[in-house]
Amino acid sequence: MTDHPTAQRTPAGSPTPDTDVGTTNGTTVGASTSTGTVPVLAPVPVSVFTTSAVVASCVGFMLIGALQAFYGPAIPALREEFGLSPSVAGLGLSAHFVGGVAGVLLFDRLYGRSGNRRILAASYLLMAVGSAGFAVAPNWPLALTAALLAGFGFGGIDYGLNQLFAVGFGHRSTAMLNILNAHFGIGAILGPVLIGVVGAEHYPVVFLVFALANLPLLFCLRGVRDSPPRLPQPAQHSASTGESTPADRALRSVLAVFVTLYVLHVGIEAGVGGWEPTHLETVGHGAGVAATATSVYWLMMTVGRFLVAPIALRFSAQTIITVSCAGMTVCLLLAAVPDLAPFAYAGVGLFIAPIFPTGLPWLHRAAPHARRAGAVVIAASMMGGVAAGPALGKVIEWSGVRAVPLLLATVSAVCLAATLWLTRATHPKPAR
């Protein structure tokens, strides 16, 4: 694939040509479904990022990964300082996720109306203010409010950068999104390490340093294109008649299945992370082995995203996600064998890694004019992570801890079925 010749022109307000690294190609094809045709459209060629802005974006994703990971290790100190029960102390992370979902939906409404730089700058500032507020809060209600505020910024960065990377690099968008999200994993790994080195009782210092670390990124936003890519508008017969066409119904079906895929695979991700230690100890492994295996699981998710970046330049998103879901299902079935479980969970981390970032460019190609599609699936993925723990816990009360990998394998099989359906539904029509 080569860039369209007009990509050499620099739109007003875009980064300078000698440092532009993000472009998109514009082509239109029809995706055939059983109920109609979903227009599959790539964005018009534009320059979105300079090299320095790409680096700053990766640092930003490291920061949001670390922020999410700070709350858990800080729980012992929070309980002691504010006199909290374990469940109440865990509300800090819940407030963060609630703010994240709200941030995604709020900033999606601003996307295209307010400049990208302003949205990202507001998100970094909200994370900084919220984190600083959490560090100095004199009581737990104010700490929760600060976590909610930081979550707003988290959601804005998560949505804003994923959205721009999904449309900003043409055929390289899938690879770049995997690299971006791999840096989230680096932050998530380093966050607990930092709390452990400093000591949980000194969590306010960590949150304050985190708040300050957001500020230099504001100066790198000049390298981000301020206006979003504009998509060519196909004819929309239903807009004038008010009737639902087969293409409209097909598009809604595609979006619904994408949301299902994202909710379920993030539920698996959170389910393994939350229940792997308990399952491994239940089937006879020591606490040390269980803790180490869980860390390896998260590490493999990060490694997997770096590994898939070059693969994404040669294979389609459909192929990558199909292989990922199939591999994830097989590994979860193998995790039911006690001796293989620690290694199988590492395999789950490796296979699940590309699904979230690889699916976004596919979604944008399948539904280029469903402007809120990206926000919906990102928000849904966050809610899937929040709901996975309680939902899986209720099922485990009935089935027992030993059934964890089999339960998750069933959900993974549904992810595979959804991917195969999406592959058929969004397959381009053959040229006539």
Image (cartoon, rainbow, N blue to C red):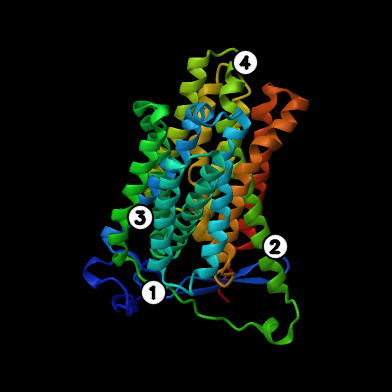
In the rendered image, which residue does mark 4 sit on? 283
Residue type, mark 2 in image: Ser
**Cα distance in 3D space between marks 3 and 4:** 42 Å
**Cα distance in 3D space between marks 1 and 3:** 21 Å
Q: Secondary structure at mark 2?
A: helix
In the rendered image, which residue does mark 1 sit on? 45
394 over 277 or under it: above or below? below
Q: Nearer the viewer, mark 2 or mark 3?
A: 3
Q: Residue at x 57, y 54 (%)?
A: 101
104 over 81 or under it: above or below? below
Residue 409 shows up from this direction:
no
Q: Earlier in the sequence, mark 3 or mark 4?
A: 3
- The picture places residue 73, in percent across and down from the top left corner, at 47, 30
Residue 106 appears left or right of 51: right
Q: Secondary structure at mark 1?
A: loop
Q: Nearer the viewer, mark 1 or mark 3?
A: 3
Residue type, mark 1 in image: Pro
- Could you say which is closer to the camera, residue 388 or residue 97? 97
Q: Earlier in the sequence, mark 1 or mark 4?
A: 1
Q: Residue at x 38, y 63 (%)?
A: 169
Q: Mark 2–mark 3 contact, CB under 8 Å?
A: no
Q: Mark 1–mark 2 contact, CB under 8 Å?
A: no
* Residue 253's disc number: 2
In the rendered image, which residue does mark 3 sit on? 57
Q: Earlier in the sequence, mark 1 or mark 2?
A: 1
Q: In the orientation shown, which residue stands out farthest toward the front?
A: 138
| The N terminus - image quarter | bottom left
**Cα distance in 3D space between marks 2 and 3:** 33 Å
152 over 342 or under it: above or below? below
